[in-house]
Image (cartoon, grey):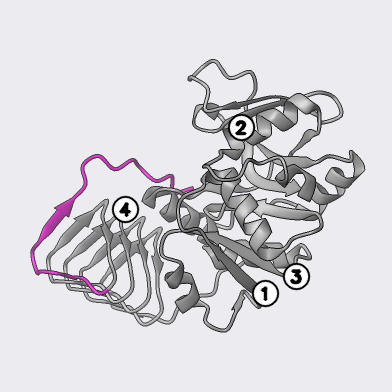
Amino acid sequence: MIEWVVGHLADNGVEKVGLAMGYRPDAFLEAYPNGHIAETPYQVAVENEPLGTAGAIRFAVEQFETKETFLVLNGDVLTDLDVRALVQFHHYVQAEATIALQPVEDPSSFGVVTTDARGRVEEFIEKPEKGSAPSNNINAGTYVLEPSAVEQIPQGRPVSVERETFPELAASGTLYALPSDTYWLDTGTPQQFIQANLDMINGKRKQVPHLPDALIDPKSLITQSVIGNGSEIEAGAIIDKSVLLNRCRIGANSEVLGSVLSEDVHVGQGARLDGCVIGRGQHIQPGELLINESRPEVDPI
């Protein structure tokens, strides 16, 4: 996912990125040991303790010694946003901070933003009660910031950019926002991760996915799923609305439904997985049933 995010930034002219990290920075460093993600050089700023969304920005800016206009993105948001247009708007209105907005049907789980005719933010309401939001435009998780905005973030304690920094900038009249009705998906849950993959194979994104090299028995049934390189699917297996990463092996007559399998997972003959997330290298015994009855449905279209 981070490779898709960084690749999109590179397509919009970004030449280097920094990752603000806390938990498990080693996973990223091991995945990209040559100092590049999607052919873009990167560096990391690792917090010793959680500083909140705004505190993390200030910490990273100080570590990276950023002195010019810069972008901040949520790492789990996938979007086709025109980043160049957002930056151009930011400079045109001479904002200290600019937020990309995205319309959604139910804004109650997000930060809701209202603006005046010039795009100046009038209200920033984080996760309003359902039915009470004054707008359906939400904070889409991409920001353009000036170093002067970062200087206003307090040091030495956790600070929320959504609940403290943005409302304060809005009150001072220096926070702007630009709506964009483009592809956008917050991929914070396993079901949304599956949705992101299905959106790729269903042509909802600008990018075209690479077809994997997998060994699939013609007597298996695979619908609305992504199968990773080196995977093997045996006869009679059923896979639906699932994502299998590289080198998975699915035994004969087994079922994988609405699930995410990491690398090197082996599913034994006749086993059934429904709404599961299986970690790297795990072996599911033949005939085993693992069912998550509370999982939400994934939209196939």
Magenta highlight range: 281-301
Please state the horizontal and vertical placement of residue 163, each as a whole percent of the image: 58, 31
- Who is closer to the viewer here, 71 or 221? 71
**Residue 15, disc:** 3
Foreground mark, 1 or 4?
A: 1
Disc 1: which residue: 40
Kindly report the distance in space between the C-alpha atoms of the residues bearing marks 2 and 3.
30 Å
Q: Earlier in the sequence, mark 1 or mark 4?
A: 1
Res 207 visible: no
Question: Image height check: is 285 above or below 144?
Answer: below
Q: Label 2, label 1: how many angstroms apart (C-alpha)?
A: 32 Å
Image quadrant of residue 141? top right
Circle 4 or circle 2, nearest the eye:
2
Q: Nearer the viewer, mark 2 or mark 1?
A: 2
Where does residue 299 sit, x and y in percent of width and height? 43, 44
Please give the residue where the numbered disc 4 appears in the rendered image. 258
Q: Earlier in the sequence, mark 2 or mark 3?
A: 3
Q: CA distance from mark 3 to mark 4?
A: 37 Å
Q: Earlier in the sequence, mark 4 or mark 2?
A: 2
User: Main SS type for the magenta part?
Assistant: loop
Q: Amino acid at mark 3?
A: Glu
Identify which amino acid the numbered label 2 is placed on: Glu
Q: Residue flagged by tag 4: what amino acid is it?
A: Gly
**For discs 3 and 4, the disc positioned in front in the rendered view:** 3
Q: Are marks 3 and 1 in contact (CB under 8 Å)?
A: yes
The kind of residue tagged 1 is: Thr
